[in-house]
Image (cartoon, rainbow, N blue to C red):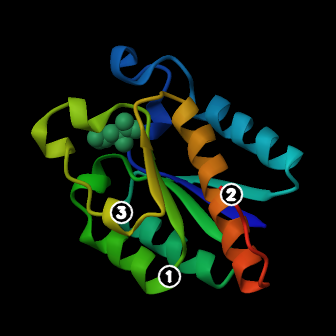
Amino acid sequence: MKILVIHGPNLNLLGTREPSVYGRVSLAEIDAQLLSRAGQRGIRLNCVQSNHEGVLVDTIQAAASQQVDGVLINAGAYTHTSIALRDALLATALPFVEVHLSNTHGREPFRHRSLLADRAIGVVCGFGGLSYQLGLEGLVTALERQADERNGIRTVD
Ligand code: DQA
């Protein structure tokens, strides 16, 4: 299985950025934890961060031709604004899980709306760096179930 992790704008500053909101964990530490977990499960994982909306769109488009099975995405502020990211995810039909470190629903009203969430397999928010781990677990489990269903194997919750 091949998973793409996408981090949007300002997430490169994790560790020093508003630690009371986002904690003290750095992006490199989050990526290392994800790579370690993926390695244990035999999953190939690639992590990309960009502050640029177009680069994120290009990354999603490229993933579709690179046999990526699913996307774990924290689109940062673009979550609340980017029709382009939504369109890229829908155009490629890549299954995705949305994650946020903070609980966006307990923050400013403009963060309550996500332009991605209704098309995500699921959304995890509010657990700091752990949101990514939980999101990866959910994404991988959902993809495995989809594969089982395609192969006629019935799974039980
Ligand atoms: C965030 C929440 C967004 O509202 C914000 O713009 C971010 C980070 C989070 O992980 O909590 O950049 O996606």
| In this view, 30 is above or below 63 | above
Camera-nearest label, 3 or 2: 2
Q: Which mark is residue 93?
A: 1
Q: From the viewer's perspective, tell me whether residue 147 is left or right of residue 6.
A: right
| In this view, 1 is above or below 45 | below
x, y (%) of residue 90?
41, 80
Ligand 1 within 8 Å of the CB at mark 3: no
x, y (%) of residue 69?
67, 72
Instruction: Say which of 46 and 133 sits in front.
Output: 133
Q: Are marks 2 and 1 in contact (CB under 8 Å)?
A: no
Judged from the image, the quadrant occupied by ligand 1 is top left
Q: Is residue 10 visible?
A: no
Q: Amino acid at mark 2?
A: Thr
User: How many other residues sit within 10 Å of disc 2, few (<14), some (14-19) or many (≥20)?
Assistant: few
Camera-nearest label, 2 or 1: 2
Q: Are marks 3 and 2 in contact (CB under 8 Å)?
A: no
Q: Is residue 20 visible?
A: yes
In the picture of the structure, the residue carrying the numbered disc 2 is 141
x, y (%) of residue 156?
70, 61
Which circle's residue, 3 or 1, is located before the other in the chain? 3
- In which quadrant of the rendered view does residue 129 lie? top right
Question: Which quarter of the rendered picture does the C terminus lie within?
Answer: bottom right
Question: Which quarter of the rendered picture does the N terminus lie within?
Answer: bottom right
| In this view, 14 is above or below 56 | above
Q: Which mark is residue 38?
A: none
Spatial distance from mark 2 to mark 1, Cα to Cα? 18 Å
Element type where label 1 sits in the image: loop
User: How many other residues sit within 10 Å of disc 3, few (<14), some (14-19) or many (≥20)?
Assistant: some
Q: Which mark is residue 53?
A: 3
Element type where label 3 sits in the image: helix
